[in-house]
Image (spheres, rainbow, N blue to C red):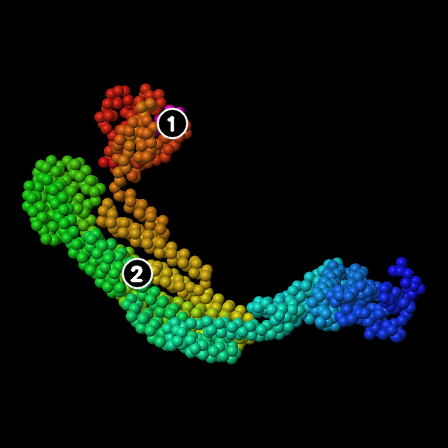
Amino acid sequence: MKNNKNVRKDNLSPVDNSTKRVYKMYKSKKNWVVAPVVLLTLLGAVAPAPIALSNVSTTVLAAEADLTGFVKDAYNKINALPVSELKDSDKKDLLDSFTTTTKEDEALTKLQDAYKKVADTVAASVDFAKAEQNINALTKVDKASYLTKVNNIKSELNKAVDTFKSDVNTKVTKDTDKYSELKATLDAAVSKAKTDLAAVVADAQNADKVNGSFDLKKADSLSQISKLTYLNATQVADFTKQVNAVANDKDYVANFDTIVSAAKAANQKYVDAAKKVVSTELAKLHEGDTKKALTEKYNKVTTVEAANSLLTEVKAAVAAQELADAKATAKTTINEFVPTDSKYAGEANKSKLASLKADYVKKVDAATSVDEVNNVVTAFKAEATGLEDIKVAAKQSVEALANISAVDKANYAYAIDHSTSKEAVDALLADAKAKDAKNLSDAKAAAKEAINGKEYLSAEAKKDLVSKVDEAKTVTAVNDLVDSAKNQDETAKKAAELATAQKDALAVLDGLKSFSDVQTYKDQVKNAKSVDDVKSAVEAAKAAYEAVLAAETDAAKAKTEAKELVSALNNLTEAEKAQAVKDIDSAKTVAEVKDTFNSAKELDNTNKVAAEAAAKLAEAKKAAVDSLKKDAYLTDAAKADFTNKINAAKDKAELDKVKAEIDKASKAAKATAEALDSAIKDANQTIDGLTKLTEVQKYEFKIKALNSKTPEEAKNVKLEAQLKDLAQTTDKAAYISKAKALLFTAEAQNGLTKAQKDAYSAAIDNAKTIEDAKKLIDEAVAKAATQSDAETTAAIDKLLAAGYVNQAKVKLAELRVDANKEAYTAKVNAAAELVAAKLAAQDVVNKADYVPAKDKAGYIAKIEAAKSVDEVNKVLDEVNQLAPAKAVQLYRAYNPNSGEHLYTANKAEYDHLVKLGWHGEGNAWKAADKGTPVYRLYNPNSGEHFYTTSKFEYDSVAKAGWNKEGVAFYSDAKRGVEVYRLFNPNAKGAGSHHYTTSAGERDSLMAKGWKYENIAFYGLK
């Protein structure tokens, strides 16, 4: 401007008016010129105007008429801002800039900038520096904590300023100006900051003063504690006691502060707990203005009372939201519903369905609760689908199912009658059909197993029966096929047993080679019509031959006759026969021969008596099992347990005891079945009345109840449904009413004593909030579950002690505490494993023909007494030791380079060596599959292999540098075939030892200079 010739320098001088400068300007046609003091009016008039006497500093354009519309309005608004809010220099700069401003957007930006500068000016009026200076001057307080509070106030004010500026951008426009509202909010924030700041400084100064005196500090501490509203009397007394105990020493300030802080923290817990409840409810709200406003209130809550008050407000919002959501969902459900098989189905009924939907949508709109909305939807579906007709059809379908019991049918019919939706009916019908199909499937699987397990049925007969089982449509038809299989098997069994008996009898008689009249008895055997006839013929032959032996006087003949008769003693094991033959051969006189035979015969008779008793017991067990299967009341689990008990019975007395237990249990099972039926109906009836459950939840619980195995399990399902209904109840009064009613349900279902129920009921009555009531009911339920489980676990332990593992498994479903479920499931499974191991072991003993019949009872008793599967296996090991060894082929290969023979039971190793150039010499001898281990070593220097049964020698040779190669094979414990060892003293390396079962080979090598080293081990005969 200084280079503009039209500008008068003297007109640049400001006029002083009480420190306020008023610039008067006018606009020439070409240039802006500062003029003498001539105040233009806001309307652009050129007449002089009085200078404002307020604190407003105004700057006026010379030709204001040139500013129009919003630009002029923005200019005037800026000009009107008081100097206390907008500094002169800032205002001048902004107004000066209007000389080049003609666009409204630019004017708006200048106006917004002016308002933002106001925010900075107003905020700067809060003197944080002075507050910090005052605090830093203190000497007896924790300055950092107070300075932190100052910073927090500063931070809050800065947030308010930032919010103001942000809102200016959106709420100050060419059309609207919310500056006054925004300024009022900012002023409130500034005022609050000043008040809070003053309070912090005052608190700090007061604390500094208090901290300087022990007595003042103590009194202040007691005063602060007494003002903590939520501490109970015990807590106040405790903290007061701690304050009174503080000593007047250098640490008294810190000690008092620690106690007061702890008291405040304890007091705050009550506030936090109340806020947590509010927070939980807040989380249920959808994002939006309502949630935002309530969250802002939540952030300002500092007392329990405020929290509880806000909770009521939040719950009302949640309830309103839930109702709105429920209505929206209900309308969608109704409008999108398409019936398929009712009078409203199809294109022809489209208008009728639309009218029905419209009516029910109106009912939804009129509903005042979520329950009412749900009931409207339920009623709509029932009408739209023709629910009553669906129920009738479903019950007819259930009644037509051939493979579920009459009790099951009645329970399903009841549940269907009380269903409130097509989905629920469909689910129940599907479950009934699934149970029907499963019963048939299970029956078929059991039938196939039974048929294929028949020992005497031909493969063709089994195939035919199994095919018919696959085609069967009912459990009854399947069971008839099983009976047919049983009858056919019995017939085939008799024929097979007769043929086997004849074959075995002829083999026995063939052994009586020196009995001249043996053919007569063979003919009787061949013509026998029954197993008993065969046995009679053999016994007659043996008696006749024994008479010959009794009259015999020649020792040689007596030995022959006695040994032949021993071979006919069918109740002796092979080991017992071998011993008897050995004793006969050792006899010196005819009398000794006869005495030895008589001893063998007596042992045979002892075994016979034991075997017959075992057979009779087995027959009685079979009859007991068959009878058990036909019991109409015992559960499958009970039948499985009693079958195990029957099979484990050691004698008739024990079997009779088990049968008595079965009879008693069957009578009890009848009562239990009736109780189960009643419990299922009660559960379904209760579930129908639970208003807070959804329809889906209801029929899910009903199906669970229908599939309960015990009355207690059905009661637990009922309880589970009640607890779910209770958890979904949001009204405090309704919740408490339901909770108290739930506490006084049946003892078997609940588990609490009357005293406990009374105590919890009273506590729930006194609950301040629904959350408090929920905590109490949760505690009561947990306590009930623990106490109920104590009874259930005791019952399971009792079942396990009695050997009823399968019933114990069923009982597991009654447990309610997860830890108990886990522990007792493991316990029951272990018990079941032990029972199965015992039964399997007993079966091994009973079928072991190498165990004398007289000794079997002893082994079975040991098995029954076993406390673990390991102990059972130890008994089996004893039994297996009696079993004759099985043959294992041993191969011999020759190395032509070293002269060594290698012996191995490993065919793959043998074949590999032959491929490498060894000469395969085939079978060496038959080794045993058990007995004394034969160890093999390898000399890495000479390439020789060495064999020994001596563990000591094995270890010693290894120490000398030989490599251990483990057990190569076993030496027969019964010393069946001798294996000789020879040593070649001239050999320098491999091949120095040779093993053979051939006495001829042994003698040939000895003749060539080999040294005989006796019997090395034994092969199997």
Above or below, 970 against 27 in this view is above
816 falls in the magenta region: no
Residue occupying the point 32% across, 63% down: 438
Residue located 25% across and 30% down the image = 997
Q: Nearer the viewer, residue 618 or 406?
A: 406
Q: Is residue 670 left or right of residue 366?
A: left
- Residue linked to disc 2: 442
Q: Is residue 910 above or below residue 109?
A: above
Q: Amino acid at mark 1?
A: Asn
The label shown at residue 939 is: 1
Of helix, strand and loop, which one carries label 1? loop
| Of callouts 2 and 1, the N-terminal one | 2
Quadrant hosting residue 257:
bottom right
Element type at marker 2? helix
Q: In the visual, does 212 lie left or right of 800? A: right
> Could you say where residue 691 lies in the image, as x and y percent from the top left?
46, 75
Magenta residue span: 939-947
